[in-house]
Image (cartoon, rainbow, N blue to C red):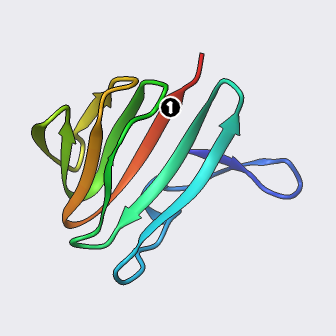
Amino acid sequence: MEQKNENNKPRVERLVDMVEYQRDAVVSRALIDKPSGTLTLFAFDEGQGLSEHTAPYDAMVYILNGEALITISGEEYRLSAGDSIIMPANIPHALYAIQKYKMLLSMIRS
């Protein structure tokens, strides 16, 4: 993914290397945060998660490495590196790290 540095010049980086794991934590790093949508990287330590919640917009999860359990409207989905899933707007969902994993969350607001 191309990122811009302080000189506003693009640079190539590996998504998986742009966020680090922290023990017993969920770490996030916003890559893009605009009125039209967001791109956010997450690193979940094993056993960590986000409890059930809803969002007013559709969101897509793309797993970079590791293994996640994503529950959407009570149905469980097991995802690993290379898998993706769309979490529909206003539908309850939760995320849990079966093993530590990193993901890219894309949310479109319009």
Residue 80 sits above or below residue 109 on the image: below
Residue at the extreme top:
110
Q: Determine the image quadrant of residue 91.
A: top left
Residue 42 horizontal side relative to residue 81, left or right: right
What amino acid is found at the position of numbered circle 1 in the picture?
Met
Q: Residues within 10 Å of mark 1 (few under 14, many from 20)?
A: many
Residue 87 sits above or below residue 15 on the image: above
Q: Which residue lies at the image location 19% right of the left edge and 31% below the top edge? A: 73
Q: Which residue lies at the image location 53% right of the left edge and 62% below the top edge? A: 18
Quadrant that contains the N terminus: top right
Q: Which residue lies at the image location 28% right of the left edge and 39% below the top edge? A: 93
Residue 108: % across, % down = 54, 24
Residue at the extreme right:
7
Q: Determine the image quadrant of residue 39.
A: top right
Quadrant that contains the C terminus: top right
Number of disc labels: 1
Q: Determine the image quadrant of residue 90.
A: top left
Element under disc 1: strand
Residue 13: % across, % down = 56, 55
Report which residue position mark 1 lands on.
107
Residue 79 sits above or below residue 26 on the image: above
Residue 39 horizontal side relative to residue 81, left or right: right
Q: Which residue lies at the image location 22% right of the left edge and 39% below the top edge? A: 83
Looking at the picture, tell me which residue is in the foreground, 30 or 51.
51
Residue 100: % across, % down = 25, 68
Residue 72 horizontal side relative to residue 45, left or right: left
Looking at the picture, tell me which residue is in the foreground, 96 or 1.
96
Residue 28: % across, % down = 51, 60
